[in-house]
Image: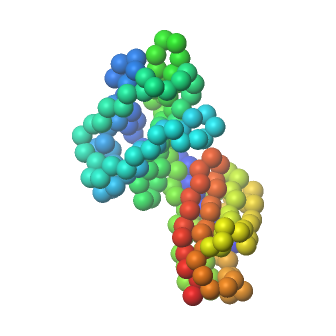
């Protein structure tokens, strides 16, 4: 059994640029996917803004004047990965950290009575939970060691809809799946 995700530093080029003391510019040409999701998360990981962008191209300006002082993560994700840059808002304006963090999303596969999560935790603690359609946790595993893949025999689960919730660090990935 294994859950996976990969964190690489500076693989995704810097995609944010300070525009003025209240706004930033997102360079959309960095992303080759048809759809991306842009989120701003506070220091606790709570999403304070989120939007989906179809066919990203060019640049997009974000006015951050409504955000309070503090540190935020600006996260852009597509189907395969998510990348983040940190922003600090203080009394002098805003500061964009030029370094990026990139994490590849774990890949989920259902093959009959075996469900697999593939990727790599790289030593980051992970938690995998299987939730039934009633919202009850039917299985949970904490993963503390680096792993590449985890396989789960779900033959004893009742037929129905389930959600796989994979938490890696501050990131949460969900996968809906039907057990037939």
**Above or below, 177 relative to 19:** below
Residue furthest left in the image = 58
In this picture, residue 4 sits left or right of residue 101? right
Left/right placement of residue 24 relative to residue 176 reads left
The count of marks equals 0
| Rendered location of residue 60, percent (x, y) | 30, 36
**Picture residue at 53% right of the left edge, 42% below the top:** 47
Task: Say which quadrant the N terminus sits in.
Answer: bottom right
Q: Residue furthest front?
A: 134
Q: Quadrant of residue 15?
A: top left
**Residue 33 percent location from the top left of the image:** 33, 56
Q: Is residue 137 above or below residue 17?
A: below
Place of residue 13 in the rendered image (x, y in percent of width and height, measured from the top left): 39, 39
Residue drawn at 60 percent across, 69 percent down: 163
**Residue 180, visible in the rendered structure:** yes
Left or right for 11, reference 43:
left
Q: Residue furthest top?
A: 92
Q: Name the side, left or right, on which 104 lies relative to 30.
A: right
Residue 95 appears at what percent x and percent y?
47, 22
Image point (45%, 29%), residue name:
98
* Front-most of residues 141 and 149: 141
> Can the viewer see residue 2 in this picture?
no
**Camera-side residue: 148 or 77?**
77
Q: Quadrant of residue 12?
A: top left
- How did the renderer colour the structure? rainbow
- State the residue in front, 127 or 147: 127
Judge by depth and name the residue closer to the eye, 108 or 70. 70
Q: Residue at x 61, y 68 (%)?
A: 164
Q: Report the quarter where the C terminus lies.
A: bottom right
């Amino acid at each position: 059994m294994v859950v996976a995700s990969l964190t690489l530093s500076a693989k995704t080029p810097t995609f944010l640029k300070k525009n003025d003391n209240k706004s930033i510019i997102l360079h959309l040409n960095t992303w080759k996917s048809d759809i991306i999701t842009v989120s701003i998360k506070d220091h606790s990981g709570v999403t304070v803004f989120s939007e989906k962008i179809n066919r990203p191209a060019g640049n997009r300006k974000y006015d951050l004047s409504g955000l309070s002082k503090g540190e935020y993560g600006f996260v852009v994700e597509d189907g395969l990965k998510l990348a983040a840059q940190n922003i600090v808002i203080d009394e002098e304006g805003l500061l964009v950290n030029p370094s990026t963090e990139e994490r590849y999303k774990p890949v989920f596969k259902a093959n009959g009575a075996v469900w697999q999560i593939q990727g790599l935790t790289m030593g980051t603690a992970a938690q995998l939970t299987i939730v039934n359609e009633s919202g009850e946790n039917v299985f949970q595993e904490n993963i503390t060691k680096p792993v590449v893949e985890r396989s789960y025999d779900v033959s004893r689960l009742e037929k129905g809809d389930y959600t796989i919730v994979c938490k890696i660090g501050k990131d949460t990935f969900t996968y809906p799946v039907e057990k037939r």
